[in-house]
Image: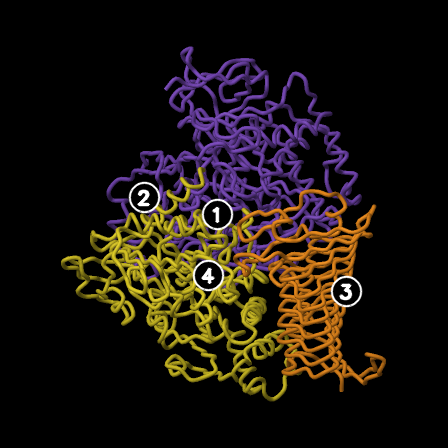
Chain colours: A orange, B yellow, C purple
Amino acid sequence: MRVILKTRPRAKPKIPIEAETIIPQNFLRKNDIRVYEGNKERKLEDLFYVTTEGPAVSPDQVEVILTGDTGVIKRVGEYMNAGRIIVEGDIGMHCGNFMSAGEIIIRGNADSWLGREMRGGVIRCEGDAGHYCAAGYRGEKRGMRGGMVEVLGNAGDFAAEYLSGGEVHIHGNCADLPGVEMRGGTLTIGGDCLRPCGNMTGGTCRIFGTAHQFLPTFRRNGSEVAEYGGKRYRMAVYRGDIANRGKGTVLIRE
Amino acid sequence: MKVEDVVCPFCGCLCDDLVVEVENNRVTSVENGCTLANEKLMEDHRLKNPIRRERGSWKDVSYDAAIQETAEILLDADRPLLYGWSGTHGEAQSVGVHLAELLGAVIDNTSTVCHGPSILAIQEVGHPGCTLGQVKNRADVIVYWGANPIDAHPRHMSRYTTYADGFFVKDAFKERKVIVIDVRKTESSAVANEFVKVDQGGDYAVLSALRAIVRGKGDLIPVKVAGVTREQLFRVADICKNAKFGAIFFGLGLTMSPGKNKNIRNAIELTEELNRHTKFTISPMRGHWNVYGSNEVFTWISGYPYAVDFARGIAFYNPGETTSVDILRRGECDACLVVASDPGAHFPRACAEHLARIPTVQIDPHVNATTHLATLQIPVAVTGIDAEGTAYRMDGVPIRTRKLYEGTYPSDLEILGKIYARVKEAKGS
Amino acid sequence: MTGLLVKNAYVIDPLSGVNGEIMDIAIRDGKIVEEVGSGAVVIDAGGCLTLPGGIDSHSHVCGTKVNFGRYMSPEDMRAGRTARKGVMHVTSGYSVPTTFGNSYRYSSMGYTTVLEGAMAPLEARHTHEEFTATPHQDMLANTLFDGNWSIMEAVRDKDVKRAAAVVAWTLAAVKGFAIKLTNPGGTEAWGWGEDVHSIRDEVPHFGVTPAEIIETMIQANELLNLPHSVHIHCNNLGVPGNYQTTLDTIGLAPDLNRERQSLYLTHVQFHSYGGSTWKDICSKSEEVARAVNARPQVAIDMGQIMFGRTTTMTADGPMEFKLYMLHHNKWSNHDVELETGSGIIPVYYSRKSLVNCVMWAIGLELALLTKNPWQCMLATDNPNGAPFVKYPEIIALLMSRKLREYEMKAIDPRTEHFVPLFAIDRELDWYEIAVMTRAAQAKALGITRIGKGHLAPGAEADIAIYPLKPDELDPAVDYQQVMAGFAKTSYTIKRGRVVARDGEVIVEGANSTIWTRAEVPPEFDLNKDPEFVKKFEQYYTVRMRNYPVQDIYLPRGVSIRTEASL
């Protein structure tokens, strides 16, 4: 089954839409789906032109396609556990939070908190991601625990903060403090970044560009070779963060 | 008439020992206050009555009409924002939170542009703190990090730290070591025993290095970290470890420089590490006299200290998303109520521009930068001068401000109470 | 007012000697009366269990440290959120709910009176502000004196009357209810990062011992004729082997009061550990219960822990730091000048942790081994052992050996070697539960005199009607129903008004705050004591005139006046 949601023009287009109900399984039953526009509850049809093609008997056969002015839509794919969502343009904050299975593809940019506290499944963002990509919730001990977030462009500050499991791959650059408070999992940064892995206690971070202002509290621990994009690179290996009980590993291209 | 033990409604020190002379509904002299206190208490330029912007010029309106219009503006909005709150008393803040839950609004206080990052850090690692008297009576080491108290909290040093004699520290000035850490020399660094000059944006690395040294992993530290020599780092770590009671105070130099909440987290974790060796505490230098009160009130009602979004009925909290600056910058909100603060003066330009585009109502005694963006302004009494109520000092100690004379202006509480009643009636609940 | 009539109620009212009689309860003007006219509104209880409103004699729900628990825990806040509904405000939080969250949840469990376990005098105004935002329970505040400099000086000078004067002045100033000692002496030592480790350790600088503080305060309490006794959180909380400190403390208690205990020991589960490390920790509940059974002058509450996530918060700053060093999660501490301390850390009690399983067993053992239910109250030291919403589950565990067996199979199997719980068959009955959840509390707190905890004519009409029919239920078997029944009343009546129905609060609350004013002769009035005034102005950072909590903070204050025997 394919569900196409195209945004309708709105009087106040900057008011965010909260749409945690947009997950494949909800379209199996032709239920009355509700979303919020600011503090007002709306029918899905009030804000979207909805087209449905073909049948489905289980959520993994459902593909939801979002098009139009989608950059202000928040929480799409939250708690998603099967099927696929394709966003033709940009997507708002909290896309794919708590997701446990399925796939989300974003053709444009993703706003902050992409895949926060993700448990499983795959998110692929073809543009840039905002701050706190694949990060945790405030005050919670563990962030993302499983699954895969891949960003083809750049990511903002605090990418993979509190990463505890799963894999995060930023092909481009990361801004400040990627992998901060990391405790597990793998973070791969294709480009440059600033102050990676502050206070990390576990997990592995690989940086194939330049790590600017690398913190003084990591201990050099030899070199090794890593493969990336079909090429092999010699990497400096560090253990840290020594400021903490750091048992994390950072590999930086030499 | 002389009023004693007056509570100063200016900064987070919340000094309560001012002596004020009042004549004909005016403060004519202030004793014991700093220059900031004197200025605030003696100031005498109030807006006379509510004003409304009509085709580019201001018209006087009645309180009743202004209250009615405010209620209507808020009821019409799909994403109203209620901002400010740090310059009023807790009882008014409480009505504000209930108004927000009734409206499905976002409510936020000035933490959003000052110690919000400190709150985020505390939510990650907690906060080993104490009341200011604990510092006054016991501390032999004081650290000011990214803070210039002489300028921003003029009596902090004399009431609580550097110059304040206490039970166990009889001659504070001689017995106390003061360390100032900042990116530049300040008036405060001039009175310090040790000044540590950090490169701009280097605080995080310096904090990490200090933590490593305190943990006994100092061998790793290079000759210089963000402009600070290895020797000085070891010396500072040593002073701290050998303190009987140490107290760190930090300001916006740490919260608002690169790394923000992570700087504060690092400083808190340094404090925790030091507690394995001796007694150490850490405290933010809160700015507005009752900004901490707004955090407290928001928290016991909604569960969160600032940036609370009630759009979905429940309380939702996510600084960066539900914080005023972010909401305004993205042009999300379609009406704004400003209470007891001046975002027109403190917010980025894009935010101010959005405030000017939407209906913005300001409840404030004075004409200020926000007035120029507002559609409606309702003047009120000044808490601590002609209105009273609860305030929370920067260390959480609650003090009731005094009313110095019976004025003619309604208080924030009265105005907000009336707006709340109108909204409640309209909502039929 | 025409009044209210509760008909066909299955009443257990231990203080009035009523045990399971079907009767009617007449209510007028907020009080229980002999009868009401025919115009009264009638509630048919249909033979359901009807008890005086629940009373929690030790809970942390309001004030500086509780609010800091909320402030630092957005992850806990999001765990229990409800939207505004009817008269009910928004609520957030699971282990440290917002004030309205606490109030609604207590109310739907039939609780109408709650004592906040720890209020720092300097920050009392905050506690009172939150009391008014906890509108469905009458509130009382234990006032902290454990590290009070003036008290320790009086103790050092062996001047009981001076100590009594300090208590009288402070309670009146901060509108407190009773004397609380949290790790006496230890919170002052914590001002230097230290602690005391037995009741005979000396407090740094002050030259007094916890034992001396405790003994002096018990005497001072009785000199002031306060309604409640000294309420103590013993030294060495949570430390393996600490049961000895607890026994030593119990041994200090004289029998000075005919109407109630002379010493109330709180959350005793946390103080009944044998062994010497976390590896050999074991239950010493039998020893502690034996001491309690032998001494009618003490009363305790359980401090039960329940498995799951919660937040610990106490004035015991040093203990929280020790706990932080075990958990490495997050830690807050807040020392209060000249008075006390406090600490907060989140915890998770796990069935996979042997230590946690031992703790769980000890709480239940204390309740089952204390012969007289009037001496052991049901509480979790909310939220330290568990949030109070777990009370129904604890009731069910105490009433059903079968449920305990079921649970004992789910916990670490080694537990059996460290605790006596597996050998205990006792099952508590409805009457004992009624004692342990309201009547004993009213007696222990000394508030029966103001009409709390019973249903005799003249009493406050605080009543809980549970959807439980004791005649048709066997709690030993039907524990699921017991749990569900105690979780949601059919009716909670507060001061003659139905405030909650079937788990929903239906009116705006209007609680009272109960505090104690002990009248002392003029020579003991510290407001006129130059030495006290001078020290106050020298060492506090708040002016003495700005310290007392103004009457405006207690919109419906009820003061219990006593005449001090000084």
CA separation, marks 3 and 4? 43 Å
Rendered view: C257 above or below C181: above
In this rendered view, identify the residue nearer to me: C442 or C475: C475
CA separation, marks 2 and 3? 57 Å
Residue drawn where x is 64% and y is 35% of the image: C394
The numbered disc on residue B130 is 4
CA separation, marks 2 and 4? 27 Å
> Which amino acid is tagged 3?
Met
Where is residue B156? Give x, y as percent: 36, 69
In-image side of A53 versus C521 (left or right): right
Where is residue B50? Give x, y as percent: 27, 56
Q: Secondary structure at mark 2?
A: helix
Q: Quadrant of residue A216?
A: bottom right
Residue of label 3: A148
Q: Comparing marks 3 and 4, which lies closer to the viewer?
A: 3
The subunit letter for the residue under badge 1 reads B
Pointer 3 local density, CA inside 10 Å: few below 14, some 14–19, many at least 20: many
In-image side of B194 versus A119 (left or right): left
CA separation, marks 1 and 2? 25 Å
- Same subunit, labels 1 and 4: the answer reads yes
CA separation, marks 1 and 3? 37 Å
Q: Comparing marks 1 and 4, which lies closer to the viewer?
A: 1
Disc nearer the start of the sequence (1/4):
1
The numbered disc on residue C552 is 2
The numbered disc on residue B101 is 1
Residue drawn where x is 65% and y is 56% of the image: A75
Rendered view: C391 above or below B241: above
Where is residue B291? Give x, y as percent: 41, 60
- Same subunit, labels 1 and 2: the answer reads no
CA separation, marks 1 and 4? 32 Å
Q: Secondary structure at mark 3?
A: strand
